[in-house]
Amino acid sequence: MSISFLKIVKEGAALFHLTVSLVCEGSAVMSSNQGSSPIAQSGGPSDGLFRKPRDPSMAPRHYRTPRSLPDVCPKEPTGEGRALCDGPSVVADQHRWTVYNSKVNLPAALNDPRLAKRESDFFTKTWGLDFTETDVMPSFYLPNISREHFSSYLQETAQRERIHERCKNICPSKDDLSVPTITNNHDKARAELEQVPKIFMKPEFVLNDPATFNAVLPWSHFSVAGGKNSRDVASSRLLQEKLSHYLDVVEVSIARQISLRSEAFFHAMSSQHELQDRLRETADAVAKLRARTAAIDRVMCRGPLRALRDALTHNNCIKLHNKLKLMAAVHQTQPTVQLLLSTSEFVGALELIATTKEVLQQELQGIHSFRHLGSQLCEMERLIDKMMVADFSTYAQSDLNRPFEEDSQVLEKDRLQSLVFGLLRQRKLDFLDIYSEEMVRAAKNVVRQCVVKSVSQISEIDADTVKFHEQMRLMTFHQWFDLLLDIFEHFILFLKRIKATLSVIRNVVLEVLDSSQRSRLADVSSATNHSDGRTNEDEEEEESVGGEAELAYLTHEGLFISDALNEAEQRSNAAAHAQTRAQTRTDACGSDSASATTESSSSREHNSNTTSSVPIGGAAAIEDVMPSDLELGRVANNVQELLYTASDVSHDRCIKVLMTRAKDGSLERLSSSEFVCLSQAVESFVSDTEELCGRRSVSLRGALQSQAYRFVQRFHEERKTKLSLLLDNERWKQAEVPAEFQDLVDSIADGRITLPDRKPTGSEDRKPSEFLCVDGEKYAVVGTVLLLIRMFLEYCQCVNDIPSITSDILTRLADLLKHFNSRSCQLVLGAGALQVVGLKTITTRNLALASRCLQLVVHYIPVIRAHFETRLQPKQYSILRHFGHITKDYNDHIAEVSAKLVAIMDSMFEKALSKYEVKAPMPSACLRNVCKQMAKMHEAIHELLPEEQTQMLFLRINASFKLHLKRQLARLGVVNDGGPQNGLVMVDVAFYSENVQALRSLERLDLNMPEIWEQKR
């Protein structure tokens, strides 16, 4: 049973897939048979054909609305909504012929397949016989089309063509089926369907129903026993074949019905789409019509009616109460000014005084009760000027001298803005000088407070008995350095506060300047409109309403202040009052011209029924009180210069702290690390102030540079003196190289030309070596040279820490290297070590060791030069020439040492060979002595000098030997004639050659001994 049931389910799924495929293929057949245009796919190729996506992930997600078939409504275009704007109007052009009604074109007329024979005289009968016989040249603009041009298209459509052919085979075209065939097929299908039991056709057919299930699968045909017999198997197979036959009949019938009704289905779908398009267009048109109707109602009806009604109501109210409110507002001027002054609202008081003056002159002139008010207002204005200057001075003192522990950058920002606005309005442009004077006094107090705080923590210094400057000198360096860092920190905070305060002042100045420029542009525009006379009733109404609204606001504000005076004891609305003051301060720069315009327009409207544009005389009068744009720009620049001055003042105070400490020379006696710490602290402070103030300052750097010059001079003198002492005590013997010096040399080879921060771990456990290895080459050195290497590394480290003294350090290092060269020359070549140290003689080993030490210094001179070159400015590269001169001096010294070694052997040769005689026994005693001396010479220097230098030195010594032997042979008259004497000489020469070439590293030395004989002429 389970196998049969699964079979039914699988066959049902196959039937569903076959039905879907028939529907798709039927649509393709209908489209191809009826010649309808294929459905365009959005985002597809430009040819408009439906393209099956090769990859499901790349398939387009949006499709255009399918276009209806052309035979639904042939006289009107169909398609998307946007085609309506290009096609003919259905209402206006329905009876007029358009291009959309055309059915035949010229190629169709010429290639009519219904004509048996084409008219040969179609063109010649009109244009002559030459028309058809003329050869037409092929067009140069049209390519020669071949089958290869369509290869890509054929590849893309090959799959669809195969599907189409398969669909034609499955469902033949309706044109191929005759009426009798259709009738016969229909009857045949009906007969076949009648074979299917009616139970499968019922709507309530459900296999879950036991009765239905038993009817479909009669269990009576199967035996009840558990075992299977041949009868049960046959019955099951028969039932399965019967159900398969029913399924085939239903599938064939469904496929036939779909193929017969596919045209009607697609016809109905295309008509539905067209109907939806037209309904959508109609709905859009109705929505647009409704929107336009609503807009017309809102713009042309409601607004104007409401504006007219509100304007009439407002004008009537203002005309009734205008004069009384204006007088009430002026009456509140004096108490309001006093209230504003009590809260330091100088800008509001000045604005109110200026507005009241203008109202008295223009609107309330001649009123007896206000005859003394003008002089009273002028006196109050002069009093406000003095109060603002005194208040600004008090503010500067409290701002600059407040404790640094406070977090706020700007003290009472609203108060500062109000003061600056008021001072600018009254042309008190010298208020920055007051701030500058207070700033200098505050800078002095910063240093004094820091010193007092530091001294209070040091018990050794009695602040009551010791003077202020002496207190700093009595401190240790670390105490004084902590004090200096504290001063730097306080000055950074000091400058940040000054910058924040000056930023507020600058913003106020720029705001006033911007307001002045905007007001001037507005006045020019208003004057232009007035001169042109292009005003109408609507504009006059709006202007009157606007002026009256401003007047109402001013009057309302005056009444509010009056209420505040009457109810001073009951401040229930303190928050709103504070907000009003803030708004007054913010808008102070532009409120005077607006107030003047308001009062003028309201007075004119009260005096006459006609209105005109607002005059600008009142605004110009108020603007004359404010500084000009040039003056405001100068004030803004002075604000920035004041910040620079603050930086310079801070640096000057720090310079005095440095000079006070350096007065007794304590800064010159600092160690390298201490001076480096001082230099880094000063450089950090200078960099911070430059970043904060935006200008490079040189005063503090200059003071540090002068101290650095003294420090460098003392630094150099100490090391030069130390080097002189080392050289004077040097015995010029090979010294052992400690491990730390070898590590130091290795770090230089790695590119780290600095002293190590601490002694390398494990260097005490390592034994010292005999030679110093530099780049794979061994150097035998004395102890002085090892310390000299450390000295010039100290110079390089000093340059790293204090870049500003690079040029001074370079000249001092050059002097140190010259001193070592000259002093070592005096001690070794000049034999000064005999008296200074007490050496008995200057041996060849001493000379070779001195030469090797000089070569080591020459090796490091290019390294030192490259290090300094990276820290010099390009314009300072000229001082690098010192290294070239030093290198030349060292090379000359090395050459002199080599010449001295040769000279020692030369004198020995001259003395020994002058007694040389050519007689038996051989080898002679003279040559034995010469070879012995040369062996001693080789033994003394071969471990000190490298192999190449040893060979070159012995070549020079051999040349000296050959010269003296040649002279002696010439004196003795011995010639190269093969005689007995010549033979004896050759024995000596062979003995000499064997002994020399037996020495280490001289085995391949070319002695060229035949040069001892005179050449025959």
Image (tube, helix red, strand yellow):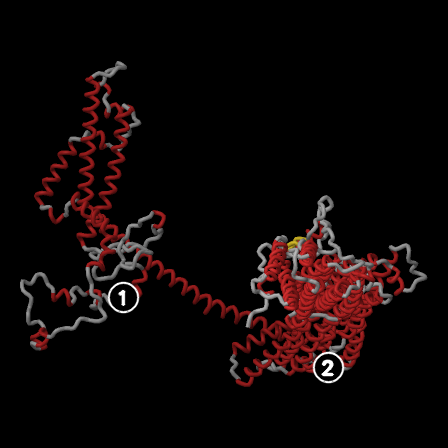
Above or below, 672 relative to 250: below
**Measured Cα–Cα span from mark 2 to mark 1:** 76 Å
> Between disc 2 and disc 1, whose residue precedes?
1
Front disc: 2 or 1: 1
Left or right: residue 898 versus residue 195 is right
Q: Nearer the viewer, residue 872 or 132?
A: 872
Q: Quadrant of the N terminus?
A: top left
Pointer 1 residue = 89
| Circle 1 Cα neighbour tier, 10 Å, few/some/many (<14 / 14–19 / ≥20) | few
The residue under the point 18% across, 53% down is: 34
Q: Residue furthest top?
A: 225
Residue 558 showing in the rendered view: no
Total number of numbered discs in the rendering? 2
Q: Which mark is residue 367?
A: 2
Q: Quadrant of the C terminus?
A: bottom right
| Circle 2 Cα neighbour tier, 10 Å, few/some/many (<14 / 14–19 / ≥20) | few
Residue 649, image x and y in percent?
A: 78, 70
Residue 627, image x and y in percent?
A: 69, 79
